[in-house]
Structures are given as C-alpha cells and as structure tokens.
Amino acid sequence: MFRNVNLKDALIREKEITREQGAMRFVYQVFNLLNDEVYADHDILKRVHTRSEGKSYPNIQVALLDEERIFTLDEIRNICVKYRLRFLDAALLKSEIPHEAIAQIKTFERKHGCQIQQFRVIAPSEMFQLEDCDKDPLLFVELESGIFYLIHQWGSDMSWYRKLVMFPFRSFVSLILTIVTTSTVLSLLVPTSFVTSQSGSPGLARFAFFLWAFVSIVAVVSYVGLAFFKSTSSAQWNSPFFKQNF
C-alpha cells in the first residue's frame, strides 16, 4: 500500500510541476499584456470619439518632433479651402478610426509620456457627422494653439482634378471670377450669327451676350447654392454645420 520514495523520481516530478507552473505564469503574463493593450486601445478610441471641452495641450517638447509632420493652422486652412475639405473634431468622423491610427497614437503617447485629449481630422464633408442634419483623411494632434502634429493618414489619394473642380467654391471672389471667366469664354466662342442678325456693331452685341450669360450663370449658381445649402470653402472649412453663410 505504501511505497518507498525514490528521490530521483520525486525530483523529476517536482521539475515537471515547476515547468507547468512556469508555463502557466507565462500564459498569464501574455494574457495580462494583451489585456493591457486592449484596454489602451479602447481608452484611445474613447478619447478620439469624445468631443473635446476647452483646450488641453500635451506637455511635449515640439523641437523633438518630426518637423515634416508639424503644420500651422494657416497651412491647414489653405489646404482645406483649395480642396474643399473640413478640419473638425475627430469625434464628428462617421467612419471608423483604423487600427494603424490607434497604434500610431499609442506609440506617440508612450514615446513622449503624455495622454492626448484633442484630435482633429482633415477630410471631405461627407465623412463627418455634421450637426445640421475620393477619401483621404488626416488625423492630427493639437500641440499648442495653432500648431498641429500629423499622427496618421489613411484611405486613398484624392482625384488629381479635385483642386481645379473646387476652385470656384474657395471663396466669394473665386466664384465671381469663375462666373466672369465662363461668361467671357462663352461670349467669345458663340458665333456672331447667333449673337446678332445685324452686320453692324458685333462688339456691342457680344457685350450684351456677355451680360446675359453672366446674369444667367449667377441665377443658376444662386439657385443651386440655396437648394443644396452650399457655401464657400473659406466659410465652412472648420465649421461643424452643414449650412454656412458665404
């Protein structure tokens, strides 16, 4: 019933128990590490999707950051106006923040020992959940007043012609300039026989056609602008509202 103990066998069993316990400790360590990473990702997502109240800047030495990723508010505004984009709080973004962006934020925070509270995004209007109602978003962190650091970019590049197509919508001046240019081109291209049936004063007839074309285009633009709540890029680039006055 009772057997003598072989010390060698007992040592071997003790060693196996130690190995099993070590393996279990390793599994627990990996589990805790993964759990910490999941919690960190969740915390970052929560902060990204929370509207910032007031101003809270991270305590970072700007001189240590990559200069190529630092942009002023004026530079951001110019890009938004040129390509008819919005620069808004990341909490208004309708699409999901990619995991690569979360990883970049986590790396940035751990490297600089800070916790970011304010995130901003450059993207087309349709990507935001605006309060009145070719995607290439850029995620920024506000370092200090008027200074922003580019954390991550995702999506595909915008169309090469977007800047040209959106030129009339940059400002009220660019809209008027586009209308005048279009009216002038039309008045020059239309045959004289279409403008007037009389042989005399073709220049005066073309000027009258220019005025007619100008008024007609202004009427169409005004109707479309009112019907679709459009405004200039310079008026809405940082507005969270769908409709904004010129």
Image: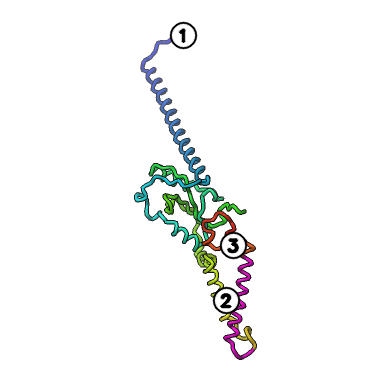
Q: Earlier in the sequence, mark 2 or mark 3?
A: 2
Q: Residues within 10 Å of mark 3 (few under 14, many from 20)?
A: some
Outermost residue on the left side: it is 63
Q: Residues within 10 Å of mark 2 (few under 14, many from 20)?
A: many
What's the distance in space between the residues labelled 3 and 1, CA to CA? 94 Å
What is the magenta range? 198-224
What's the distance in space between the residues labelled 2 and 3, CA to CA? 22 Å
Location of residue 51 in the rendering, given as x and y in whole percent from the top left corner: 53, 46
Q: Which of 167 and 230 is in front in this view?
A: 230
Task: Kindly identify the residue that appears in the image at 62 percent across and 83 percent down.
Answer: 195
Mark 1 residue type: Met
Image mark for residue 230: 3
Is mark 2 in CB contact (under 8 Å) with mark 3? no
Q: Is the magenta stretch mostly helix, strand or loop?
A: helix
Q: How is the image coloured?
A: rainbow
Location of residue 161 in the rendering, given as x and y in whole percent from the top left corner: 51, 66
Q: Indicate the quadrant where residue 18 lies.
A: top left
